[in-house]
């Protein structure tokens, strides 16, 4: 298996919003931009996506039957600078989680947002395959965020 640091997914984007707005849209506003039909456990049956805006808060989807599927737990909450959370959407064993850290830095008249997704080694034999999938998947997901944050 490749060295864990070699598996880190790193994404950097810039939006026209101030850090405060970018942070709010990414966290409390996740419902407005997350592509739930294509990037959720329930797919077409996903009714909502929520990030509870505090350390220890959950990140989860709600399906059309009212059931909740946990995606992760907020491990660090420092508005408007940084949020971090575990990530295990749909994993049978939530102990097989990865880690996501997102930072927001003022950049001219906008905000540079950097996402670092690590912890792939916890997935064992699935680590490299999952990392490759997320590397492309984050591009699509973050494009949806940029669109909403730039409104």
Image: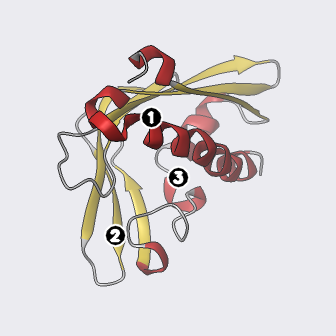
Picture layout, residue 89 above or below residue 73: below
Lower sequence index among marks 3 and 1: 3
Tag of residue 69: none
Q: Where is residue 126 in the image (x, y as percent from the top left)?
A: 35, 41
Lower sequence index among marks 2 and 1: 2
Q: Where is residue 12 in the image (x, y as percent from the top left)?
A: 67, 27
Q: Residue at x 17, y 49 (%)?
A: 93
The residue indicated by pointer 2 is: 62
Q: Mark 3 Cα within 10 Å, few/some/many (few <14, many 20+)?
A: some
The residue indicated by pointer 1 is: 128
Say how many tags the image has.
Answer: 3
Cα–Cα gap, marks 3 and 1: 31 Å
Rendered image quadrant of residue 92: bottom left
Q: Where is residue 52 in the image (x, y as percent from the top left)?
A: 33, 48
Cα–Cα gap, marks 2 and 1: 29 Å
At numbered mark 3, what does the secondary structure look like: helix, strand or loop? Answer: loop
Q: Which residue is drawn at 42% across and 74% down?
A: 46
Q: Is residue 54 shown to the viewer in this render?
A: no
At numbered mark 2, what does the secondary structure look like: helix, strand or loop? Answer: strand
Q: Mark 1 Cα within 10 Å, few/some/many (few <14, many 20+)?
A: some
């Amino acid at each position: 298996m490749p060295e864990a640091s070699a598996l880190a997914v790193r994404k950097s984007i810039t939006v026209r919003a101030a850090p405060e707005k970018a942070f709010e849209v990414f966290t409390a506003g996740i419902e407005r931009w997350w592509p739930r039909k294509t990037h959720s456990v329930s797919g077409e049956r996903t009714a909502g996506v929520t990030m509870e805006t505090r350390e220890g808060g959950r990140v989860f989807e709600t399906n059309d039957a009212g059931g909740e599927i946990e995606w992760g737990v907020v491990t660090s909450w420092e508005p408007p600078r940084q949020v971090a959370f575990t990530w295990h959407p749909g994993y049978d064993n939530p102990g097989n989680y990865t880690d996501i850290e997102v930072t927001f830095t003022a950049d001219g008249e906008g905000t540079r947002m950097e996402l670092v997704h690590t912890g792939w080694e916890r997935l064992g034999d699935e680590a490299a395959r999952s990392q490759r999938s997320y590397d492309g998947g984050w591009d699509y997901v973050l494009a949806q965020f940029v669109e909403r944050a730039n409104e």
